[in-house]
Image (cartoon, helix red, strand yellow):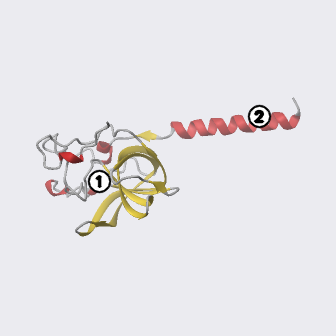
Amino acid sequence: MSKTLKSVATLAAMLAAAQADAAADVAHIFWKDLRPATQAVAENANLPMIAAKLPDHGETLSFDLQDKTIQLSGYALPVDRDGDLVYQFLLVPWTGACSHMPTPPPNQIVLVTPAHPYKMSEAYQPVSVTGVLKPGMEKSQLFILDGVLIVQSGYTVRKAEVASVDTVPDAVTLPVNSPWNFLNKKKN
């Protein structure tokens, strides 16, 4: 093998190893990981946790994952879009959050800025987000049918890689007798 070919092969092997290491450093997390360990879960496991029921209104954040690369699945609610291209969205743990149902606590909302505009076919599309998690309160303005809603998120992920997923592993499924159960995502 020539010296140049050996150099190229060595460089390719080093790049492959670095990419494998980077993938291994991604923490696959769940929504509960964004709550401080001292915060209780929802009183009724079949109902979403809402800020009004929490003593701190869900503003206590977990700093365990600060500046770590995470992967989290949830439902995307567009904040900044142009047609079907989304430039920023809120990642929430259940469908209907913020626009049809009570807003989750800030420590259960992630403001996501994709690395590249993300093509979204519908609001509350299930997605997986990979990027560096930054705790810190941010306010976003949502335009909903009956006006404007200001939503406070507890975390941000900028330059995120976003991918569609079929399901969100730890999503809250609304009870059958809920007036909002039509929001439960079902695959045909």
Height in image: 32 above or below 61? above
Residue 100 position, x and y percent, is: 21, 57
Please identify the residue farthest to the right as the structure is shown: 2
Depicted 152 relative to depicted 48: above or below = below
Point out the residue furthest to the front here: 188
Which residue is label 1 attached to? Answer: 107
Quadrant (top left/top right/bottom left/bottom right) for the C terminus = top left
Q: Which residue is mark 2?
A: 9
Q: Residue at x 58, y 35 (%)?
A: 20
To which quarter of the image does residue 57 belong?
bottom left
Real-space CA distance between mark 1 and mark 2, rounded to the nearest whole angstrom: 46 Å
Which amino acid type is marked by label 2?
Ala
Q: Which mark is residue 170?
A: none
Residue plotted at (28% across, 39% down): 186
Residue 150 lies, in percent from the top left, at 28, 67
Disc 1 residue type (three-letter): Asn
Q: Which residue is depicted at the point 26% across and 44% down?
A: 37
Residue drawn at point x = 42 percent, y = 60 percent: 88
Residue 136: horizontal and vertical position, in percent? Answer: 36, 60
Other-residue count near label 1 (Cα within 10 Å), few / some / many at <14 / 14–19 / ≥20: many
Q: Quadrant of the N terminus?
A: top right
Q: Is residue 68 visible?
A: no
Residue 55: tell me if it is visible. Answer: yes
